[in-house]
Amino acid sequence: MPAPTDIAPRAGYPAQLLTVTGRSLAQLVRSPSHSRRAEAARKLARHSLWLSAAGAALVIALMLAFDLTEIQLMPARGTPGLWPIRILTDFGKDEYLLSALGVALVVVGLVAPGLHGTRRALLLGLGTRLQFLFLSVALSVFVGEILKYFIGRGRPFVGGKADPFNFIPFEGSGAYASLPSGHAITAFALAFAVSALWPRLRVFMFTYAIVILLTRLVLLAHHPSDVTAGALVGIVGAMAVRYWFAARRLAFAIRADGTIVPLPGPATGRLKRVAQVASAP
């Protein structure tokens, strides 16, 4: 979200809410303005191509040499002792993560019009970053759903036997929506997006993503090649959204060589002070 500090302080709250919401949406679709966006686009295309080629080769290798062995080593689906894994895996469910990010965006949108000056700028700066996280996950998940439908790979043991080459394209049911893994897409898109904004969280976020990936294997929800493909889709999708934001000078800057780096964000201490002021009677 932008930091519009020129809204008349005396304007009514509904008018300010509409203005802030309109500007926050308009910034996402405005024409790119960064002078180095061409260099960043070339770097994005190059990295996406290499990642996609290497990822596709790994997916095929896993499908041919490892998927069958791995799913036969996992505990039977429905094993009672796996209940902690079933709880843990939900932390990678796209509906839950997108809902949480959506609620956070709504809260920012409702609180920001009641603030002015630096306080509003700080909160809207957080809003821009929440938009980036939300769209990184949403775009990646959307692409993943299209791929699932076109590919139509059966989940482990669907059909009664361990067959990693059980494909019914365009089948459209959950049983044939194994490739790519939606949980892996969500977890890796979020991990990349958070790490892009706050690099110090990189190890924590990718550890979280790997844990989610492993839960899908233990629960026999996916083959190893499915989660690998999901991780690839999530990372490339978040990379594309990062470029979109950087080209519009939102949350990111572009260096001379096309490298995209995060802009300094709102400090946690200052955000806490803003929240206290906003919630004060």
Image (cartoon, rainbow, N blue to C red):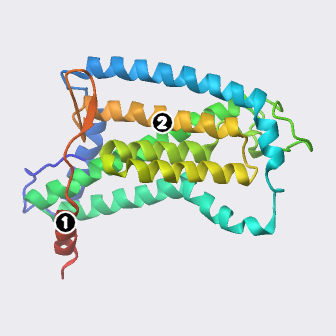
| Label 1 Cα neighbours within 10 Å, binned few <14 / some 14-19 / many ≥20 | few
| Label 2 Cα neighbours within 10 Å, binned few <14 / some 14-19 / many ≥20 | many
Residue 155 visible, this angle = no
Residue 37: percent from left, percent from top: 26, 22
Look at 25% across and 26% down and name the residue there.
32
**What secondary structure is marked by label 1?**
helix
Of the numbered discs 2 and 1, the one sitting upstream in the chain is 2
Q: Is residue 102 above or below residue 139?
A: below
Amino acid beneath label 1: Gly
Residue 52 falls left or right of residue 43: right
Residue 131 falls left or right of residue 218: left
Amino acid beneath label 2: Ile
Q: Which mark is residue 269?
A: 1
Q: Which mark is residue 231?
A: none
Look at 28% across and 58% down and name the residue there.
109
Residue 62 falls left or right of residue 249: right
Cα distance, mark 2 to mark 1? 30 Å
Residue in the foreground of this view, choosing between 201 and 25: 201
Q: Which residue is mark 2?
A: 235
Q: Is residue 44 above or below residue 135?
A: above
Look at 37% across and 45% down and name the residue there.
195
**What secondary structure is marked by label 2?**
helix
Indicate the quadrant containing the C terminus: top left, top right, bottom left or bottom right.
bottom left
Residue 12 falls left or right of residue 224: left
Residue 21 visible, this angle = yes
Residue 43: percent from left, percent from top: 35, 20
Look at 76% across and 50% down and name the residue there.
220
Residue in the foreground of this view, choosing between 216 and 14: 216
Residue 55: percent from left, percent from top: 58, 27
